Image (cartoon, coloured by chain):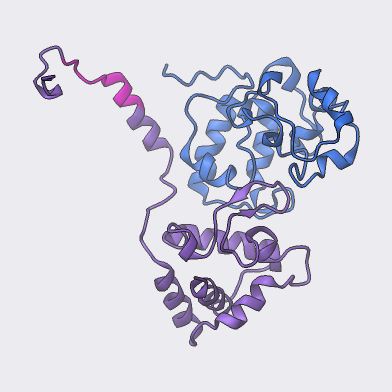
Amino acid sequence: MFRKSLSMNPRKKPPCVAGLALALLIAAQWPATALAADTSPAAQLQHWSTQAGSPGNAQRGQTFFNTRHGAEWSCASCHGTPPTAQGKHANTGKSISPLAPAFNPKAFTDTAKVDKWFRRNCNDVLSRECSAGEKADVLAYLNSLK
Amino acid sequence: MGAAHADGGRMMPSSIPPAYTAECAACHTGYAPGLLPARSWARIMSGLDQHYGSDASLDPATVKALSGWLQANAGTYKRVAEEPPQDRITRSAWFERKHRKVDDPAVWKLASVKSAANCAACHTGADKGRFDDDNLQFPAGLPLRFRLAFMD
């Protein structure tokens, strides 16, 4: 059956200006949380390796990832081991997307997000920020998982 | 005024800031703002670096935006007006009363539940602020004797 394209429809309604204005107002109030894809897992590994002055080491990263650093949790407590499948928050049970980039195309693609979660999670696991060397090792480990 | 009326009820407002989903609901159920009074939300948002044992710190702009939304939509109806101990939803008098028949701590610690804060383990509409009995599901491994509690 023949159909007119929408753009030629004489009864086409004008866009709802009030709705559009509200959407813009809301967008202005709520800061964007993710500037998607401004980095990559390989770039993150490079970044932290450069900061540390030596290349990340996957073996060290694996040990670091699975170790409780004197407290209740390890990285693996929530992300699983190996972190190639969906994880589960140790307290709440909320599911967490796989951390290894080969199993999650969004992992380590947003600089602000990477920085934020390293800050939060290192504080939770180690009661301090992680060093550049530790982050490089973790990235080397995660990038090695296929 | 637009679609998001601040009526203080327990339903999730029709528009949710993307940051709320990305930051808060990444770790736990995205609780409807109406489940706590404004002063509880204010305390929670002023101490995100020590958020019930976790570092949930955010940049100041996001904290400000989310605080505004939580304050505008906080619970004002009678049941929620009281500030629960530690600003925990699960310590509210109404929460304890509604769950009084789930009186074995082992139920809350089931692998499929983890904790009382995991509303969605049983309330399938939790992230929309819907807690009616017809949206309930038995969590895996729930002992038979507790299934009656769901009918109440």
Q: Position of residue B35 (x, y in %)?
A: 68, 27
Image position, residue A4 (x, y; %)? 10, 20
Chain A shade in the render: purple
The structure residue drawn at horizontal position 55% and vertical position 58%, both measured from the top left corner, is A98
Which of these two is toward me, B77 or A16?
A16
Q: x, y (%) of residue B136?
A: 70, 26
Q: Residue at x 53, y 33 (%)?
A: B68
Is A14 part of what is drawn in magenta? yes
**The N terminus of chain A is located in which quarter?**
top left
Residue in front for this viewpoint, A100 or B18: A100
Chain corresponding to blue in the figure: B
Percent across and percent down for residue B133 are 71, 19
Q: Does residue A75 belong to the magenta stretch? A: no
Regarding residue B93, the answer to whether it shows in the image is no
Q: Quadrant of residue A73?
A: bottom right
Q: Residue at x 58, y 63 (%)?
A: A119
Q: Is residue A116 left or right of residue A39?
A: right
Q: Identify the residue at horizontal 73%, vertical 22% (top origin).
A: B80
Viewer-nearest residue: A53 or A44: A44
Q: Is residue B28 above or below residue B101?
A: below
Q: Quick check: B89 left or right of B72?
A: right
Residue closest to the far top: A11
In magenta, the rendered stretch is A12-22
Name above or below for residue B70 compared with residue A69.
above
Is residue A83 left or right of B4 when viewed as pictured? right
Quadrant location of residue B41? top right
User: As displayed, is residue B151 above or below residue A76?
Assistant: above
Task: Residue lying at the far bottom in this picture: please name it.
Answer: A54
